Image (tube, rainbow, N blue to C red):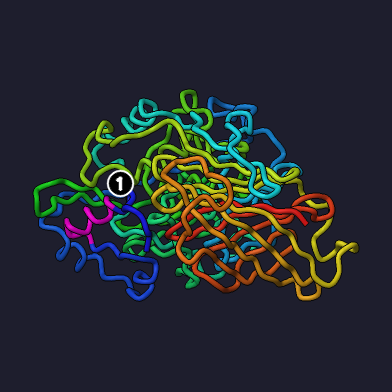
């Protein structure tokens, strides 16, 4: 459990529970809860009055190649190759996204600030530590303006009554298509409060099931030619999301609109006409529809938004556009039953950042309206680690970690990675973990208070130029090797009680 005060998202979850929404308290409990409860029983037990039933069906990414009012601005025309790391399987959905930005490997959310936007704080070993506030959000007015379009129809802003949402791909989905879906989930999860991150079930869904047969709290993803379930006018679209939405009066008389279940079709007749990157963007766009947003953002007004009617064909170094980052987090910050965009609580346009630099490895974490987003970045190696002829036996990297506790207290410690080149497995240890105040610049090593028992230890396995946890303490570790000869390493470690970026050199 988080050690600090509850986040606004945890508070909202408690509020929903108190109003009769049977929300699970953890990822573990939703797994125990299978099979999902029958939707009619849910309706009878949880709510006093059923107001309405709506099926919302936005289709997306229609039309031919480029052009039109929705043409992506130049910011998206980079050469990002999203195939960093191995083919991602369902088991990898908990990991952070790994993206190769034309030679720069990046782990985690695209929130790294320029070093010159921050003030240098101190040195931790060989790492230069900087910190500071950066205005990198869209701002409250922009967020309220964005949400206003969803509140014009009272059915239109709705998150799932059951959090976290369970995603499944249909039985028979190819490894390549599963990879697209997993990468889209990894990207959106890097921008969602931990409590609201999607869980990818290893149990496939029936192919082509009716929306009415999708269990409550689930999103089913089908890859296939558009068939009988999809209206004729959606046949040229790249994807379509349909969501079962219900409005209820809760026992206090407050009207709550909630998504019950959702289904996505990705049109395989069109998929091959686009890059993997464009298809992942399109997948993430459909998932945003399923998670919270039924409508589209105006392309002229929000050219960087993933939620534009023609989703961008790729993403910038920020991965999600500034307005995307705000609205995906803000959707879960609205109180249940909100009827106006103005009901969004306090919303800051600035993030507090911690950043570490060691040679050309950089890493850090952003705290943005309570959302913690770690990252790490460095040059792509010339070969996979296994093919580095200069390395044999075991290799070690030493460095530092920078993070926040779940209550946004600054956190730092040592990061030590050792890999056995023969087995491509090893160990990463984070030791001497200490914390300071909320949004405080970390002091010199040894000046903080010991965090928990002071260390976290994980066994890891190497996959191409990335590594992930295979055991050890709770949490997820996603890392990469950096530099032509794997001179550097870095990544992120995420738990319910902390989130951190780390980096080191050999
Ligand atoms: Zn759409």
**Foreground residue, 458 or 165?**
458
Residue at (75% x, 44% y) in the render = 359
- In reply to whether residue 56 is colored magenta, the answer given is no
Q: Secondary structure at mark 1?
A: loop
| Place of residue 232 in the rendered image (x, y in percent of width and height, measured from the top left) | 45, 46
144 to the left or right of 494:
left
Asked whether mark 1 and ligand 1 are closer than 8 Å, the reply comes as no
The residue at which mark 1 appears reads as 158
Residue at (22% x, 40% y) in the render = 338
**Foreground residue, 150 or 325?**
325
Per the picture, the main secondary structure of the magenta-coloured stretch is helix
**Foreground residue, 235 or 196?**
196
How many C-alpha atoms fall within 10 Å of the one at disc 1: few (<14), some, or many (≥20)?
A: many
Residue most toward the front?
Answer: 447
Per the rendered image, the range of residues in magenta is 11-21
The image quarter in which residue 145 lies: top left
- In reply to whether residue 18 is colored magenta, the answer given is yes
Residue at (31% x, 30% y) in the render = 148
């Amino acid at each position: 459990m988080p050690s600090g005060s509850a986040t606004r998202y945890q508070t909202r979850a408690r509020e929903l529970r108190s109003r009769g929404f049977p929300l699970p308290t953890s990822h573990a409990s939703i797994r125990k809860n299978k099979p999902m409860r029958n939707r009619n029983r849910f309706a009878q037990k949880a709510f006093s009055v059923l107001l309405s039933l709506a099926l919302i069906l936005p289709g997306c990414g229609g039309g031919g190649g480029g052009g039109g009012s929705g043409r992506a601005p130049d910011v998206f025309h980079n050469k990002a190759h999203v195939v960093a790391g191995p083919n991602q399987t369902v088991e990898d959905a908990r990991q952070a996204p790994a993206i190769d930005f034309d030679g720069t490997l990046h782990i985690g959310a695209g929130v790294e600030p320029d070093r010159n936007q921050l003030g240098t704080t101190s040195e931790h070993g060989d790492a230069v530590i900087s910190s500071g506030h950066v205005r990198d959000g869209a701002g409250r007015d922009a967020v309220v303006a964005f949400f206003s379009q969803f509140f014009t129809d009272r059915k239109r802003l709705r998150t799932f009554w059951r959090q976290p949402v369970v995603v499944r791909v249909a039985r028979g989905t190819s490894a390549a298509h599963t990879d697209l879906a997993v990468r889209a989930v990894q990207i959106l999860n890097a921008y969602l409060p931990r409590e609201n991150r999607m869980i990818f079930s290893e149990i496939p869904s029936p192919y082509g099931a009716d929306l009415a047969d999708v269990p409550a709290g689930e999103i089913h993803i089908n890859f296939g030619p558009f068939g009988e379930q999809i209206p004729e006018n959606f046949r040229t679209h790249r994807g379509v999301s349909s969501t079962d939405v219900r409005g209820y009066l809760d026992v206090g008389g407050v009207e709550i609109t909630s998504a019950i279940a959702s289904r996505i079709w990705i049109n395989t007749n069109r998929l091959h006409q686009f890059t993997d990157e464009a298809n992942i963007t399109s997948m993430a766009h459909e998932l945003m529809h399923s998670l919270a947003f039924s409508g589209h953002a105006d392309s002229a007004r929000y050219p960087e938004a993933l939620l534009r009617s023609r989703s961008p064909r790729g993403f910038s170094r920020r991965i999600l556009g500034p307005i995307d980052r705000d609205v995906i987090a803000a959707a879960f910050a609205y109180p249940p039953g909100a009827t106006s965009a103005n009901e969004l609580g306090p919303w800051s346009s600035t993030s507090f950042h911690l950043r570490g630099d060691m040679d050309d490895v950089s890493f850090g974490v952003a705290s943005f309206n309570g959302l913690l987003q770690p990252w790490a970045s460095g040059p792509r190696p010339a070969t996979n680690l296994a093919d580095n002829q200069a390395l044999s036996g075991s290799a070690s990297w030493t460095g530092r970690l920078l993070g926040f506790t779940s209550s946004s207290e600054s956190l730092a410690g040592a990061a030590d990675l050792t890999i056995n080149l023969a087995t491509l497995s090893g160990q990463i240890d984070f030791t001497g973990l200490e914390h300071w105040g909320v949004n405080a610049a970390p002091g010199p090593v040894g000046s903080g208070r010991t965090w928990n028992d002071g260390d976290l230890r994980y066994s890891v396995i190497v996959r191409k130029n990335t590594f992930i946890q295979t055991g050890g303490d709770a949490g997820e570790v996603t890392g990469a090797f950096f530099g032509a000869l794997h001179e550097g390493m870095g990544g992120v470690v995420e738990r319910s009680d902390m989130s951190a970026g780390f980096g080191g050199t050999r």
